[in-house]
Image (tube, rainbow, N blue to C red):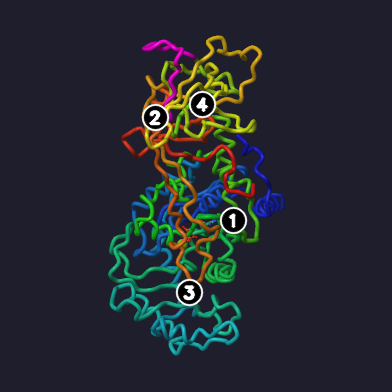
Amino acid sequence: MSENSTPTNFIRQIIEDDLASGKHSRIHTRFPPEPNGYLHIGHAKSIVLNFGVAEDYQGQCNLRFDDTNPHKEDEEYVEAIKEDVRWLGYEWAGLYFASDYFEQLYQFAVELIEKGKAFVCDLSAEEVREYRGTLTEPGRESPWRNRSVEENLDLFRRMRAGEFEDGARTLRAKIDMAAPNMNMRDPALYRIRRGAVHHQTGDAWCIYPMYDFTHPISDALEGITHSLCTLEFEDHRPLYDWVLDNISAPCHPRQIEFARLNLEYTVMSKRKLTQLVDEGHVEGWDDPRMPTIAGLRRRGYTPAAIRDFCNRIGVTKSDGTVEMSVLEAAIREDLDRRAPRRMAVLDPLRVVITNYPEHEEETLTGPNHPKDESMGSRELKFSRELWIDRADFREEANKKYKRLVLGGEVRLRNAYTIICQKVVKDISGEIKELHCTYDPHTLGRNPEGRKVRGVIHWVSALAAVPAEVRLYDRLFTVPAPDGDKDKPFQEFLNPDSLKVVQAMLEPALAEARPGDRFQFEREGYFCRDSVSKDLVFNRVVTLRDSWGGG
Ligand code: ATP
Ligand code: MG
């Protein structure tokens, strides 16, 4: 919808230049998640960028699982990631696994050894660290660096054959131990992981290639033209290029880095999200408070709103943190347009219309959308007993209070005006019910000679459908929960991030299907939960920015 106007950015500029100069005649990108967790809103930024660019320049985008770390990865994540990418509205040109390339990667490593550009190193992890030097001091060369090509080939073959313990040996690139960029100081290319069972390759391999070796080669094998990644890989680009320059690569993709998305009041890394799940702070990866795609989907976010959000925040080279209100504005705008209006009373207070006949019920109608007639209308039931929200009544209030007061008159949305005549309390002094009178001549028109204070929502007590409504708030109490060095982010969890209420809904809501979204008038946007068997609604977002500041 609003995506026709995808704002341009420096990456799109590079692509346009490459097309104009003839450097490339077609564009090929990829989205390369590691299947070690569910996708989050940060990944959505990368997905919208990679798939969006491919779409806009008639190119292609692959989905590639970067699965070189058998210990942390799982097939469950592979399936969830595919579902999320599709749900966001994208279809990949090719589906690949970096593990598909294990044999080719091995052969490229052999090529490097044969060219004298890689060696098998016997230093332990700790020794490697000692030898590496620091930012201000050059490193020292490994004593194993000058092994003969024959010896290296033999040892690497035996690494593959499983002859050595985990950590006993690594294959390292032979580059420059004095390089100012630490990534170029003879980085590891392969490590031994003998016990691991890989979700795709099983126990076929006991050596696994490192990201910095795997990624450029995978890109090249797929004919990727622009390899878009986040800024933390900027320092790895020289190694990306070194790998491709030193093997017989079919092509040399260009790596371009952009800033990762950080969002206020949440954590974003899969490691921390895993902790939230494993430690039971949330219900699961799809808990509606999670910044995961699965969580946002269950919360009631639409793919269009997430894509719109990603376009709004743009793509730049400078890191920053985006306010939650930007994400919320995107879903609010989308749902304002498409969500049918309904009435739901979240904190029910009984109202008895004393001049309305007992046991009678009449059918009224309410438009599904005030600005979109094509959405039609639904039936409402009016009767002698109604529910209104406790917050919509005060015994006394000044003129600014636009709701019901004792002796005052308000309109019930899509129905009549009522005047509160009497407040009935229980022995503790709590208001039990209100006795009101209605004016039968006010359906669709104003009362003569009187001004009503305002409009409130209501539900007929006879027809109301009880339901659980989950009111979600921010998951953390501070904008940057992982920004404190001395305190783990879990200490900033918001104890009130979920409030559950028993609400009374208008009857039409009984037919809501899982995932259906509505505006509950005057309350916010809500989505029928897709996990609970019962009638449960999740609050997607309030009607107005409640985050303060905005
Ligand atoms: P995490 O720390 O959350 O696990 P990651 O970068 O390790 O993130 P990957 O699965 O490796 O996660 O990421 C797949 C792609 O998504 C990469 O290209 C990565 O740069 C990108 N990506 C991950 N997080 C973000 C983010 N917050 N903003 C933008 N892009 C991101
Ligand atoms: Mg990662």
Where is mark 1, residue-wise?
Answer: 226
Where is mark 2, residue-wise?
Answer: 513
- The answer to whether mark 4 is within 8 Å of ligand 1 is no
Q: Secondary structure at mark 4?
A: loop
Residue at image location 53% in from the left, 70% down from the top:
243
Give the label, 1 or 2, closer to the camera: 2
**Badge 4: few (under 14), some or many (20 or more) residues near its Cα, within 10 Å?**
many
Residue at image location 42% in from the left, 52% down from the top:
38
Give the label, 4 or 3, closer to the camera: 4
Left or right: residue 15 compared with residue 233: right
For residue 431, above or below residue 103: above
Give the label on residue 457, or none. Answer: 4
Give the label on residue 301, or none. Answer: none
Distance CA(mark 1)–CA(mark 2): 42 Å
**Badge 1: few (under 14), some or many (20 or more) residues near its Cα, within 10 Å?**
many
Magenta stretch containing residue 354, yes or no?
yes
User: Do the residues bearing badges 2 and 3 touch, measured as CB atoms within 8 Å?
Assistant: no
**Badge 2: few (under 14), some or many (20 or more) residues near its Cα, within 10 Å?**
few
- The span shown in magenta is 348-364
Distance CA(mark 4)–CA(mark 3): 73 Å
Mark 1 and mark 2 lie on one chain; the one further toward the N terminus is 1
Mark 1 and mark 3 lie on one chain; the one further toward the N terminus is 3
Q: Secondary structure at mark 1?
A: strand
Q: Is residue 135 visible?
A: yes
**343 and 257: which is toward the camera:** 343
- The answer to whether mark 1 is within 8 Å of ligand 1 is no
Where is mark 3, residue-wise?
Answer: 112
- Amino acid type at image mark 3: Leu
Asked where in the image residue 224 lies, by quadrant, the reply is bottom right
User: Do the residues bearing badges 4 and 3 touch, measured as CB atoms within 8 Å?
Assistant: no
- Amino acid type at image mark 1: His
Q: Is residue 294 visible?
A: no
